[in-house]
Structures are given as structure tokens and as C-alpha cells.
Image (spheres, grey):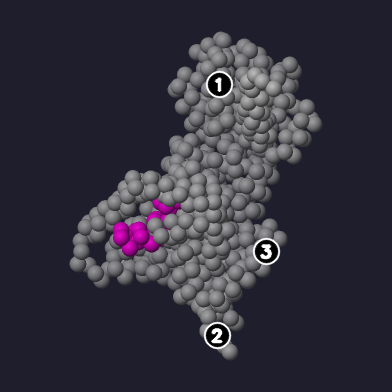
Amino acid sequence: MEHNVPLITTIAAGFGIALILGFLAERIRVPALVGYLVAGILIGPATPGFVADVHIAAQLSEIGVMLLMFGVGLHFSLNDLLAVRRIAIPGAVVQMSMATLLGMGLAWWWGWNWGAGLIFGLSLSCASTVVLLKALEARGVLDTMNGRIAVGWLVVEDLATVLVLVLMPPLAGVLGGQAAAEGAVPLWRTIGQTLLSVSAFIALMLIAGRRVLPWMLWQVARTGSRELFTLSVVASAIGIAYGASALFSVSFALGAFFAGMVMRESEFSHRAAKESLPLRDAFSVLFFVSVGMLFEPAVLMDEPVHVLGVVAIIIVGKAVAALALVLVFRYPLNTALTVAASLAQIGEFSFILAGLGLSLGLLPPEGMSLVLAGALISIALNPLLFAAIAPFRRWMLARSELARRLEMRDDPYAELPMSTEHKYLRGQVVLVGYGRVGMRIAGALEARGIPYVVAEQNRELVEDLRHQGKVAVSGNAADPAVLIQAHIANAAMLVIATPDALHVRQMADNARMLNPDIEIVLRSHNEGESQLLRNDNIGTVFFGEEELARSMAGHVLARFASASAEPVGHGA
């Protein structure tokens, strides 16, 4: 008996081939995303052999877009963005504008209209969050200052792209798309209605959603059912996305993004992220597979110069723009190279933008294939760019006086002001890192009247601390110059509260060299690392889970001790 089940066939073929090619991609040190895209090409209509159902794949990809955007919203942190806002916001806006103009120029040279060029340029301007996070995590720099700047920069790009997705449908007519024939409704009214609908949806989510969603999650969590909790998270993401589209004419992507943002406010946000992750991963794979099905491999042979131009904009144009912008903001060469490598690729938002442009008649099919070719090549080459940062930096520093000056930028916050009170410079605590842990330690020190100096890589945070009257110095405490500025020689204690595990030993060694008698206190993220640090006798090591268990056990034992001490009465 023959079954006509295109849905099952498409899912089975997509998952199966994506698994094989994703595994092979990871084995050759290329992001698995490249394997998923190639899997889509193999089962797409442009290649011989089995062809999956394109229409079903498109609908599955819509679910993938919803869950991807839900995940972006769930991990969106306004505080992380505000911490690097002075460089991330102007940097991302200028870099996106430059990349868009380069893409428009290339499209104009090919004879496309300006609307197609604009969508094409925008598609080349936004980097992949998935690729960036994996690259930074693999190198252990996600929690460093360089990593935070790159992530903050990308968050701004994501927000700008969401705004573009909202405005594209009402502007399609002006840009030369299919909506041009309507013409009856004035443009200002169309844009006004769109912005009004979006504003109404956002207001509803921020006012009602922030109360209803956390309450609903709490009620479901009380049942103790894991599958019900997962179902509630996924149903919220897809239901809100669909409701936003049906009631407010808002895109699925924006609806899902705000669902994630609102759910982040709940105390169950971490559990929601964890429980929905497998389903999000599965449908994001189908999203990348369905995008690959739209790719025309013939473009590589028919228009190699066009492909080279696209790759040059993504890898060279965007990287050089980001490099120059970071240097203009007076950050060191190492930071500029890291941010440049982070942004020299495109991914999921580019596909969403190009796909919407294609459906609105703004972007020709050739444009979609060129965007996909640029994504495949740039993502495949991105690990090589990251690997080249260190040797390229060493080569530049050895041969260029300009590079040496750029590496040692004059930072106005790298030195303590002359007005700093003398009491802070003797017997003080040098506190490295002013994140969630460092902030609490600083509060405890202030409550006891113990002087301290903060050493923090985030220059913007140091500026804010100085405005508050706190003593702080900007820079990486692994650099002896930063410890000298914090007057480590006269300090009583060094407290390393930063999660930067790469430089902990270097910080401790430099501190002991400058002050052999200093006491060192540091944090660790895992049991193995904490044991190694204790074996090396670097200082007093605190491991998060160990301290939590000790505090909880102490509380339990104290309650039992007080219960056993209570009088039992006379008699017997």
C-alpha cells in the first residue's frame, strides 16, 4: 500500500540528511548550520534526485522562524545592551548602513531597481546570532569584554532588523514590490496604521502579557508536569505569534520575539528556555533546510563574479567597517579584531529578510540565491577568521608602529584621577569585575566602610562608577599596568569576581609579583577548575554550587540544632 504523506517525507528527509551533513560539518570544524543549508540544497528542486515538498517546507520554516525569534527574545537582555550602549548602538547602526549602501551599489551595478538593492543590502548587513554565540563560546570569550561588545552590537542589529521586518510590507509598493498596484491608500496612512498596530500589540504585551504569562507559567508549574510546562511555553510562543498576525497584522517574527521578551520577565525564564530548547533546535534545523531548498547552485557557475562581490561585502566590507568603528571609539586593536571577525558573516535574519523580500516581489530569485551563497561561504570561513586573530595581531604588532599605538590606546579611564582620596590607595581591596557578583561584594564592603578600587574592562561601566563617586579603573586586570593603577602594591586583598577564567592565573601572578604579601580571593565556575586552582595554591577559591550547598546545609543544620535545644518539659 502506497502512502502519500509529503509532510512526513519532508520532515524525515530534512532531519535525516541534515543530521548527516551537520555531523560532517562539525567534524571538519565548520558550523553545523552549513550542513543544514547544504541538506536543503540536496533535497530542493534545483538538484537531481529526491525533491521534498517546497510548500510544506515553507510552512515548517515559518514555525522555525517563530521559535528562533522566540529564543532571541527569551535571551534578550536590556541590561547587557545598556552596558555597552555607547559603542554598540552607534557602531551597529553605522556598520549596517555602510554594508547596506555597499549592497545597494553592487545591485545598482547589476541593473536592479533601488528597492531590490535596499533589501539585498539589508540582508547582507545583519550577522547571525547563532554563529556568533557558538564562535565566542568555543573560544571561551563570550563573557569577556570583547564578547560582550560583539553580542551587544548584534542585539542592536537584531532590533533594527525587526523594525525593518515590520516596515517592509507597508513600504513594498514604494519600493517597487507587488503592493505597488494597490496605490489607493496613501503611504502615510499605511505606515501610520502599521505603526499603530505594532504599538497596540507591544503595549498589550508589556501591560497584560507581563502579568498573564508569568501567572500562567506559575499555574502550570504547580502541576509538576514537565510536558505541560513545555507545552505551555511552545503554545505561548506560537499562539502569541499567530494572534499578533491575525489581530494586529504584525509579523509572526515580531510576535514571537515579544513573547520571548515578556516571558523573560518571569522567574521561570531559565526553565522556559531549557524546556523549549530541543523543539527550537529541531524547527530551526528545518528552517535552515527549507532556506537551502530555495538556493540555485547554478548561480555559483553562472555568476561567480556576483558571488565574489557578495562575499567581499560580507567578509571584507563589514569587517573593515567594524574594525574602523571600534578603533574610532578608542578601543584596543584586539577588541576591534574580535568584533570585526564576529560580524564577518550573515545568517538567519538575512534569510528572513530575503525571504520576505522575495514574497513581496521586492527581491529577484537570483538575490535570494546570492544571499544564500554569501551565507554559506562566510559561515564556513568564519572559524578561520577567528583563528587568524591572534597570529595576525602578533604579526601587525611586530611590524607596525601604528598597530602598537592602536593596541595601547589612551584610555581616559585607565588612570585614577589625582582627586582620588588617599585612603583608597592603602590597605584597600582591589575588586576585579563589577558584574552581579562584584556589585554585591562592593555593597558589602561599602556597608563596612572598607575602601576598594574596581578594575573593570567595561569602560562605560567605569565611567558610570566614577560619576557615582566610586573609585574605578578601566582595563584588563591581567595587564600589570591596570593593577598598578589600582595601587595593588599597597592593597590588602585582590578579589577576582569576574567570570574571565582565561586570565585568572595571570591576574594572580601579576598581583603577587607586585605585592608578594597580598591575599587573593577568586571565583570558579566548575568543580574541576576550582580543584586545579586550589592545587596551585593561588588563593582562596569559591565555587558557586559548593557555596550554595554549604549555605543550604548550614541553614538546615541550624534549624535542627535549634529544634533539639528546645526544652522538652519535666517528667519521666
Task: Determine whether, in the image, residue 138 is placed left or right of residue 275.
Answer: right
Q: What residue is rendered at 63% in x and 71% in y?
A: 16
Asked whether the beta carbons under mark 1 and mark 3 sit within 8 Å of each other, the answer is no
For marks 2 and 1 on the same chain, the one whose residue lies earlier in the sequence: 2
User: Magenta residues?
Assistant: 242-261
Please name the residue that numbered disc 2 is placed on: 3
Mark 3 belongs to which amino acid? Phe
Residue 86, relative to residue 365: is it above or below? above
Residue 535 in picture, x, y percent from top left: 80, 31
The secondary structure type at the circle numbered 2 is loop
Hey, which quadrant is residue 562 in on the image? top right
Residue hosting label 1: 444
Rendered-image quadrant of the N terminus: bottom right
Q: Residue at x 71, y 18 (%)?
A: 518
Give the main secondary structure of the magenta stretch.
helix
What is the crowding at mark 2: few (fewer than 14 residues within 10 Å), some, or many (at least 20)? Answer: few
Q: Secondary structure at mark 3?
A: helix
Residue 198, percent from left and from top: 31, 53
Q: Is residue 108 visible?
A: no
Rendering coords of residue 547 (x, y %):
66, 32
The residue carrying pointer 3 sits among few (fewer than 14), some (14 to 19) or many (20 or more) residues within 10 Å by Cα, namely some
Instruction: Name the foreground residue: 470 vs 106.
Output: 470
Disc 2 and disc 3: Cα gap in Å?
30 Å
Q: Nearer the viewer, residue 394 or 22?
A: 22
Residue 23's label in the rendered image is 3
- Quarter of the C terminus within the rendering: top right
Residues under labels 2 and 1: Cα distance? 69 Å
Residue nearest the viewer, comparing 72 with 160? 72
Specify which label sits upstream in the sequence, 1 or 3. Answer: 3
Find the residue positioned furthest to the right: 535
